[in-house]
Image: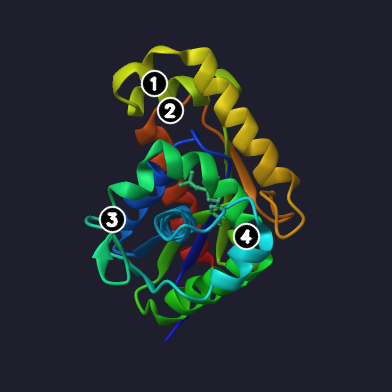
Amino acid sequence: MENPVIVAIDGPSGTGKSSTSKAVAAKLGLSYLDTGAQYRAMTWWMLSNGIDVNDATEVATAAGKPAIVSGTDPSAPTITVDGADAAGPIRSQEVTAAVSAVSAVPEVRSRLVELQRSAAASASVGIVVEGRDIGTTVLPDATLKIFLTASAEARAARRNGELTGPAAADLAATQAALAKRDAADSGRKTSPLAKADDAIEVDTTELTLDQVIECIVTLIEEKRAAR
Ligand code: DC
C-alpha cells in the first residue's frame, strides 16, 4: 500500500491557514493538526501556572509538564491540557500576546515537535499539518508543502474580521500586532517561520477561501496521481 499523504501548510497569521487546512483535510478525508493551537495550549498552561513567560529558563524547565492532546478530526478539532478543554482560552489576547516568547524556547519546540511527528506517523488516512516550520523542520519529507502568504493589509483585515468587541475596531493596531508577532516568529533562532525550498507559495491576497482550497486540493490530487 502507498504511504499516507502528508501535507504541510505553513505561513504567517491572517493568510487563511487554519480555515484552508481544515477544509482541505475534510474534503479529502484526511486528519488535521493545528500546531499553533499546541503552542497556544503550552502558553496558556504557563500563564495559568504563574510561569514568567519572558524567562526562558523558567519556561524551559516547565515545558515537559503539561499534557497536551490534540484531536485530529477536521470537522471538530479539539485540544486539551491536562484533560481540560483549552479551545476557548487559547484564543485569548493574553495567550496571543505571550505565545511568540514561549514558542521561541527550544525545549518547548522539541517537546511539541515530538507530539506533531507522532500525530503524523499515526494518521493512517494521511494528514494536513499547519504551522510555521512544518515543511522545514517538523515534516521535511511531507508529500506536499504549501507556503501561504497575503499582503499585510489583507491579513490585518481578515484577522480583524475574526475579532469581536473594541479590538475589532482598530485595523492599524491589528496590523501592528501581526507585524510584531511575525517579526518574532521569523526572527527566532530555533526553527523560525520560513518557506521550505521545495514548498509551493500561494499568495492568497486576491483569492477567496474557496479558491485557495480548490488550488491546494488540486495540487494534492496531482501529487497522488503522480505516485
Ligand atoms: O497559528 P497561530 O497564530 O495559532 O500560532 C500561534 C503562535 O504559535 C505563532 O505566533 C507562533 C507559534 N507557532 C510556532 O512557533 N510554530 C508552529 N509550527 C506553529 C505556531
Which one is in front, 196 or 225? 196
Measured Cα–Cα span from mark 4 to mark 3: 21 Å
Name which quarter of the figure residue 63 lies in.
bottom right
Query: Circle 3 — which element?
Result: helix
The disc placed on residue 132 is: none
Query: Circle 2 — which element?
Result: helix
Label 4, on which residue? Answer: 135
Q: Are marks 3 and 2 in contact (CB under 8 Å)?
A: no
Q: Is residue 31 visible?
A: yes
Q: Please give left or right for residue 76 compared with residue 183 in the image.
A: left
Label 2, on which residue? Answer: 159
Q: Is residue 151 visible?
A: no
Label 3, on which residue? Answer: 26
Mark 4, mark 3: which one is toward the viewer? Answer: 4
Measured Cα–Cα span from mark 3 to mark 1: 31 Å
Q: Please give left or right for residue 15 compared with residue 181 in the image.
A: left
Nearer the N terminus, badge 3 or badge 2? 3
- Name the amino acid type tagged 2: Arg
Q: Are marks 2 and 4 in contact (CB under 8 Å)?
A: no
* Other residues around mark 4 within 10 Å, as few (<14) / some (14–19) / many (≥20): many
